[in-house]
Every structure is written in structure tokens, then in C-alpha cells.
Image (cartoon, coloured by chain):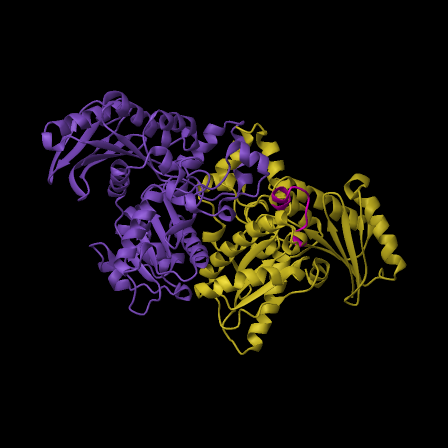
């Protein structure tokens, strides 16, 4: 079966075509929102048609960041899916409204092709209650749809599955206690027991957790309020600063990528790297406590090639504290890009 | 030297008169319901040599409460203080040592008081009243943040633009330092480890505020509280960690009223918000658990969330510390609630922690070692005594021949 993977972003649309499971074309349509989903998808259609990907056997997978509790797994693009998307639109309007538009466009541009949605949050729908609950009143949490999510669930799920296979190959029957480290622009660490997530660093939004390329990660909530009040930014300005004007780029002083921070020897990058690695050690210790120890460590994400930098810093600390199982120091990398992970999802 | 130590709450004033250097408690008590009139009358619970008395007296402010306490003490010439030691929650970026009060200190205290809007302002008003009413008595100020002055830059840095950080002082300060330092010193004595070599995680679990502290070589390297005492663990009425985007969403819903959101997150969340029945975790755990807690999943959501957050941070800090000598449990909950001690330490054998459930249940007299004989990391319940700690610091300052400038420069 051929698969066309679509990853709509705020400004661009990434696509990848898989012919019998092998990636045959990949690219990005810029100005995606500006030109409209239909027009952008029309361009993609022409490209994949040219490489012979489009036939009656082709299915389309559309990436969604937030699926809320309505989408505990991938779902076919259907009237029912649109109803469910409408229900969660209030919780994450920026992402969901764009996704609805893209999904409609897919139906128009690729009529007859089976299409499905795959969400980053699905893996975390069943996060334990104690982990997903914030210490606010249940009424308020319900009104705001407030709970913790992870935002790299597709990587964590696929990487943990792979790590679990390795664990079982060693002859273990018990589910593996997996430390899953996703090295994306907004990095994320999850504790996974077998195939079930137990903790995750992100929060109600992707802002909470580890610092990323432009997002602050965790800060005292009083700081967020002070930015809006004392610093005069207002709520929207404070949010924009924390999401887009903070993180590793702010620490370095100019826009940087995660891989650059992890590998550069420049002193400004070293400082940013130290802050990131410190938070990663904390998050890994948290995961180890949640799991009662770590059997396997797996890295994923577009910057997984930098895993050694993180592993060399982090694993000796876990080992020193006693939290690392006998084989966990032999960390692994899940090398697949997001496009390939999406192509493997089934509705 | 008799030092009266004041620990000022928003509507209370706790005090202890301590003879130094022997650390003998001569008198103590608490002025309750200080401030506007409440359903019950304001009163002072006063105790001397085991003899308790309750004095009902109007105390519209902390200055009046202080005056009334001094009157009670002055009834006996042997109880007249020679000095006053104050607890101050937040020392801001400049107080890296405890200090003797002078004009410059007073000015700085007033300047930084809004960094801890619940805790510092009443304490600063009390300091001012003491100065005005008893100008001849030397006063010291002991800060909760001072022990955390050693938190390294990497741990105290928020990933924010440096210019904003410099302008507004956004950084982790850490709190409960006086308590963490006191119990860590006691733990070092118990274990026969020099304090400057002690590696530990201290869990100050109060009935109100709570924080964990990672200690390496006797120095604080991290604390769960942050820029303010709001961050970190789930507390009685404070939310602890919260996605900053959520705080901003609440601000929008409150039409930009930051004080209302701060009030919500500080006074109506935490155990109270989650349970809807009580701000005291003892009530919540007692309702949910009858006998030893076998699995925290069996507890109510409020109890689960409270305990889970502590366990997570405990794992994080044990990883930071590396080879820990001990985990210390202290303050009201840590000292008195075996359910909580068990639920946060059990199942962490991977970190070398093995709690002995019988010892844990039986521990009535503190300090107590709650761990099994084979536990690599000792689990200790130690009673905190912030007042004695404050008296120690105050005495040290008052008998020192160093000038204030020399001390601050150290």
C-alpha cells in the first residue's frame, strides 16, 4: 500500500510519500496557510502523481498535534471525526481549526483515498490520573479542559515499542521500564511502562516541561503572571514571549536549533546546554522514580543523532543514584523520522 | 543571652524565648487571629515552663500582638529578652547572609517585600514595630532563602531572555532554607557524617507549605520552590507546578486581574482545591486510607496527586545528589503522618531506599530511622525547629566581631 503523509504546521506543510513502505518523495510547501490548504494540497497531489505514488491503493495520513480525549488513537477522516474535532476545537483552537480545514481539503483533493488522522496526544489519553491532574479544583479543571498531555506521543509510542522488543529479546517477561527521550525542537521526556506512559514533561500545553528552541519550559507560575503584569506584556504578550521568545534561543542570544546547542563548543551555547541537560537529569530522575527504576533508554526525534551528548551526561547520574538497570546504559536510538512513524499508523 | 524568635504568619505570630548558647526554651506561644476581627476572639496561647495560659486580647495588627507578647514576658524579669530574631521568608537577590538589622537592611526589606506578598509584608511590619517600640534591643533577620544562595546558576536559571531576568529578578530562590539546613545538620550528627560532607534530600512537608531540597556536601543545590513559594509541590492551598500557559489563561478569564489569579493559585488550589473538603492532607489521607497504604492508586485523587508530586521530585533530587546518605522527612506531615512517609518512599529500592513499615508506624519519638537495616540510603524522620535554628544564627551574628559589611561580603 502507498501512503501519503501530511504534516500541517502554522506556516508550512510537510509531506512525504511512501511507495510500498519506502519513502519516495518528501518536501515542504511554504506559505501553506496563506495560500490555503486546497491549493497547497493541489501542489502535493501533482508532485506525488509525478512519482507514481497516487493510485487506487494510496491512503493519506494527516498529522494532528492535539486530539484531546476524543481521539485515543488514529481515526479515519469522516463525518464522525469532524464532529469530534469540533468538540475539542475550543481546547486548542490554533491547531484543531487548522487541522479541520486540512482534513476537509484532503477529502476534496484526494477524493476516494482513505484518509486518517494521527495525533501526538493519543498516546497520553490514559496517562494515570495522579500524573495528568493539576492541583486545582475539579470544577475549574473541567471548565478549562485542564490536564497534562504529552506532545510527542507518536515518537514515544514507536520508540518504546522498539525498546520493548529489545528488552524481550533479552528474555525478559515483565514490561520494560523505559525512559523515552524525544529530541525535537521542544524536547520531551516520558516514562513508559511497557507501552503505557506513566509520566511526561509537557503539560496542558507544550509550553510546560523542558526548555526548547524558543519555549521557556517550566517556570514558576508567578513568573508568568509577573511577565503579564509587572513587565507590562499582558497575558497574550507574556504567552508569546514564553512560547516564541524564550528557551535556548533566549539563553544563547539568537535563534538556535537544539542540535546546535547540544554540539556547539561556543560558551553561550554551553550555558544553554547546561540548563537543558540539568532539566533533563531532573526529568529522568522523575521518570525513574515513577517507574521504580529504568530498564531501557531510547532516544527519538529529528535530533536523535545528538543522543550521545545527552546520554553521556545523563546516564552516569542515573547510574550513580542507583536507578539504572543492568542493561539500561546501552541506550538506543529510534532512527525513524516522524513521517515514517506516521506512515506506520493504522486507523 | 535570651533571644526571642518571631515567626510571623499572615494572621498569627509564633514566638519562642530561647536562652543561648544552651538552646534552652524559656517561654513560647502563639498569638492567634491577629488582624481584623473574626468569629472567635484574638488570643495568645502562652507557655512558660510547661504551664499554659490563654490570654484573650484584641490584636488588630502584628505590632499590637508583639507588644502584648512582650508584656507577658516582662511579668518575669528572667524572661526579658536581650535580642530579637526574626524569620523572613524571602531575602531577594541581595541577602546572601542572615543580618543584624540596621537602616540599610530595613530599607532593603521594604524594597523587596512584594517578592513574597503573603509572607514578607507582615514580617516586615513586625520588624518595623519592634524597632520603633524597643529601639535598644538588637534585632536579627534570618532568611529562608539564605541556605539556597548556593544553588548553582544552572539550577536557578529560567530559560527566559536575560534582559528581562536582570530587570525583574526572575530566578529560582528556594524557601524553607532554615528548616532544611537545621534538619540536615541534625541528620549529619545522627549519621556521624561531617555536615560539609552530607549528601541528602530534605523533605519539609508542612501542613501549609512544603518543599524538597537537594543537598550536596552540606550545601543546597536545588529546592522545589522557585521565584516564589508557589512553584513545586502540591501544598495545602497552593497549586505548586502549573503550566505557565494555564496561569495566563486564568489571567485572561479574570480580565487581567493578576491579584485574583495569584489569590486563586495561592489560597484555593492544592489539597483544598483538589479535595474540596480540607486543606490539610491529613484529613484527605485519613479519609482514603484505613491502615497502611498498599498502593497510592487506592487513595483519593487529591491524595494521589499530592503524594505523586513528592515522589517525582524525590526521584529527581536523588538523581541530582548521586550517592545520598539519607532522605529526611520533617515538619508537621513529615514528622507525624506515617501514611505519607510510606507512600512517598516505598518502592524506591532502585534509589537505595527501603522503608521499614513497622518502624515507620511505630515512630513516635523523633529523630527516628525508618529504614531497614539493608537500606543503602537512610530514611530519617527529624523534628524541625526553625526557632532554635533562628536563635543559633542570631546568637552567632550578635557575638561575632565581624562588621555587617564583612559578614555580607563573606
Q: In this view, does B271 lie to the left or right of A243?
A: left
The quadrant of the image that shows the N terminus of chain B is: top left
B150 in the magenta segment = no
User: Is residue A253 covered in magenta?
Assistant: yes
Chain A rendering hue: yellow
Say whether residue A17 is left or right of residue B269. Answer: right
In front of the other: B286 or A23: A23
Q: Residue drawn at (66%, 58%), measured in percent from left and top? A: A301
Above-or-below relation of A329 to B172: below
Q: Is residue B310 in sight in this rendering? A: yes
User: Foreground: B89 or A82?
Assistant: B89
In the picture, residue A215 is in which quadrant? top right
Estimate the x, y position of residue B3 in percent, counting from the top left.
21, 35
* x and y, in percent, of residue B141 in the image: 32, 34
Chain B pictured colour: purple
Residue under the point 28% across and 69% down: B373
Q: Is residue A309 left or right of residue B278?
A: right
What range of the chain is rendered magenta? A248-259
Locate the C terminus of chain B and report the quarter of the image it occupies: top left
Picture coordinates of residue B52 (x, y %)? 12, 36
Amino acid at each position: 500500500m502507498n501512503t501519503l503523509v501530511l504534516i500541517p504546521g502554522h506556516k508550512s506543510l510537510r509531506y512525504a510519500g511512501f511507495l510500498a513502505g519506502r519513502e519516495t518523495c518528501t518536501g515542504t510547501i511554504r506559505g501553506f496557510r496563506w495560500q490555503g490548504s486546497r491549493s497547497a494540497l493541489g501542489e502535493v497531489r501533482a508532485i506525488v502523481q509525478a512519482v507514481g505514488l497516487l493510485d487506487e491503493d494510496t491512503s493519506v495520513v494527516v498529522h494532528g498535534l492535539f486530539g484531546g480525549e476524543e481521539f485515543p488513537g488514529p481515526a479515519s477522516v469522516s463525518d464522525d471525526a469532524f464532529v469530534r474535532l469540533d468538540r475539542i476545537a475550543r481546547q486548542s483552537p490554533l491547531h484543531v481549526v487548522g487541522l479541520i480545514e486540512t482534513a476537509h481539503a484532503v477529502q476534496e483533493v484526494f477524493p476516494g483515498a482513505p484518509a486518517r488522522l494521527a495525533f501526538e496526544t493519543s498516546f497520553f489519553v490514559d496517562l494515570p490520573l495522579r500524573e495528568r491532574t493539576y492541583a486545582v479544583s475539579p470544577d475549574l479543571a473541567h471548565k478549562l479542559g485542564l490536564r497534562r498531555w504529552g506532545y510527542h506521543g507518536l515518537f514515544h509510542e514507536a520508540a518504546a515499542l522498539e525498546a520493548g522488543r529489545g528488552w524481550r529479546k533479552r528474555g525478559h517477561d515483565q514490561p520494560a521500564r523505559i525512559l523515552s527521550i524525544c529530541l525535537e525542537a521542544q524536547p520531551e521526556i516520558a516514562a513508559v511502562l511497557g507501552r503505557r506512559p506513566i509520566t511526561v514533561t509537557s503539560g496542558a500545553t507544550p509550553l510546560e516541561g523542558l526548555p526548547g528552541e524558543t519555549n521557556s519550559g517550566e517556570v514558576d507560575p508567578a513568573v508568568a503572571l509577573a511577565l503579564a503584569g509587572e513587565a507590562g506584556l499582558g497575558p497574550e504578550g507574556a504567552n508569546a514571549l514564553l512560547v516564541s521568545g524564550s528557551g535556548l534561543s533566549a539563553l544563547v542570544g539568537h535563534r538556535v536549533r537544539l542540535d546546535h546547542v547540544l554540539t556547539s563548543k561556543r560558551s553561550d551555547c554551553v550555558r544553554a546546554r547546561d540548563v537543558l541537560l540539568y532539566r533533563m537529569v531532573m526529568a529522568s530522575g522523575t521518570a525513574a522514580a515513577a517507574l521504580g527504576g529504568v530498564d531501557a533508554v531510547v532516544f527519538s526525534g529529528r535530533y536523535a543523532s545528538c543522543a550521545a551528548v545527552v546520554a553521556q551526561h545523563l546516564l552516569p547520574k542515573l547510574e550513580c543514584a542507583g536507578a539504572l538497570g543492568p542493561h539500561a546504559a546501552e541506550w538506543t536510538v529510534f532512527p525513524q523520522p516522524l513521517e515514517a512513524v506516521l506512515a506506520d499508523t493504522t486507523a | 543571652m535570651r533571644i526571642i524568635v518571631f515567626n510571623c504568619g499572615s494572621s498569627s505570630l509564633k514566638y519562642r524565648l530561647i536562652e543561648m548558647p544552651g538552646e534552652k526554651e524559656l517561654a513560647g506561644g502563639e498569638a492567634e487571629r491577629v488582624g481584623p476581627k473574626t468569629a472567635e476572639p484574638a488570643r495568645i496561647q502562652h507557655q512558660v515552663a510547661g504551664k499554659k495560659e490563654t490570654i484573650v486580647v484584641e490584636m488588630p495588627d502584628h505590632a499590637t500582638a508583639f507588644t502584648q507578647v512582650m508584656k507577658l514576658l516582662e511579668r518575669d524579669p528572667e524572661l526579658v529578652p536581650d535580642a530579637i530574631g526574626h524569620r523572613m521568608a524571602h531575602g531577594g537577590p541581595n541577602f546572601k547572609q542572615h543580618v543584624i538589622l540596621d537602616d540599610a537592611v530595613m530599607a532593603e526589606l521594604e524594597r523587596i517585600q512584594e517578592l513574597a506578598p503573603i509572607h514578607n509584608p507582615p514580617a516586615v511590619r513586625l520588624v518595623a514595630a519592634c524597632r520603633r517600640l524597643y529601639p535598644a534591643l538588637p534585632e536579627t533577620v534570618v532568611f529562608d532563602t539564605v541556605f539556597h544562595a548556593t544553588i548553582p546558576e544552572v539550577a536557578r536559571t529560567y530559560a527566559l531572555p536575560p534582559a528581562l531576568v536582570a530587570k525583574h529578578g526572575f530566578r529560582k530562590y528556594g524557601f524553607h532554607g532554615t528548616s532544611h539546613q537545621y534538619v540536615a545538620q541534625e541528620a549529619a550528627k545522627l549519621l556521624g557524617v561531617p555536615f560539609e560532607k552530607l549528601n541528602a534530600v530534605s523533605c519539609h512537608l508542612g501542613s501549609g507549605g512544603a518543599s524538597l531540597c537537594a543537598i550536596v556536601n552540606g550545601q543546597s543545590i536545588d529546592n522545589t520552590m522557585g521565584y516564589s513559594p508557589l512553584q513545586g509541590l502540591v501544598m495545602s492551598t497552593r497549586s505548586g507546578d502549573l503550566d505557565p500557559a494555564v496561569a495566563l489563561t486564568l489571567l485572561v478569564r479574570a480580565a487581567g486581574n493578576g491579584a485574583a489569579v495569584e489569590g486563586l493559585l495561592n489560597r484555593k488550589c492544592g489539597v483544598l482545591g483538589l479535595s474540596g473538603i480540607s486543606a490539610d492532607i491529613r484529613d484527605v489521607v485519613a479519609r482514603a486510607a484505613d491502615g497502611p497504604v498498599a498502593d497510592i492508586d487506592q487513595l483519593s485523587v487529591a491524595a494521589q496527586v499530592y503524594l505523586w508530586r513528592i515522589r517525582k521530585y524525590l526521584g529527581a533530587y536523588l538523581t541530582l545528589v548521586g550517592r545520598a546518605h539519607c532522605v529526611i522527612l520533617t515538619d508537621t506531615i513529615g514528622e507525624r503522618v506515617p501514611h505519607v512517609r510510606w507512600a512517598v518512599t516505598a518502592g524506591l529500592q532502585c534509589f537505595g531506599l527501603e522503608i521499614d513499615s513497622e518502624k515507620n508506624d511505630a515512630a513516635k519519638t523523633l529523630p527516628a530511622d525508618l529504614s531497614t537495616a539493608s537500606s543503602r540510603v537512610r530514611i530519617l524522620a527529624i523534628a524541625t525547629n526553625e526557632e532554635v535554628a533562628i536563635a543559633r544564627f542570631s546568637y552567632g551574628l550578635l557575638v561575632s566581631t565581624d562588621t555587617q559589611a564583612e559578614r555580607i561580603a563573606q
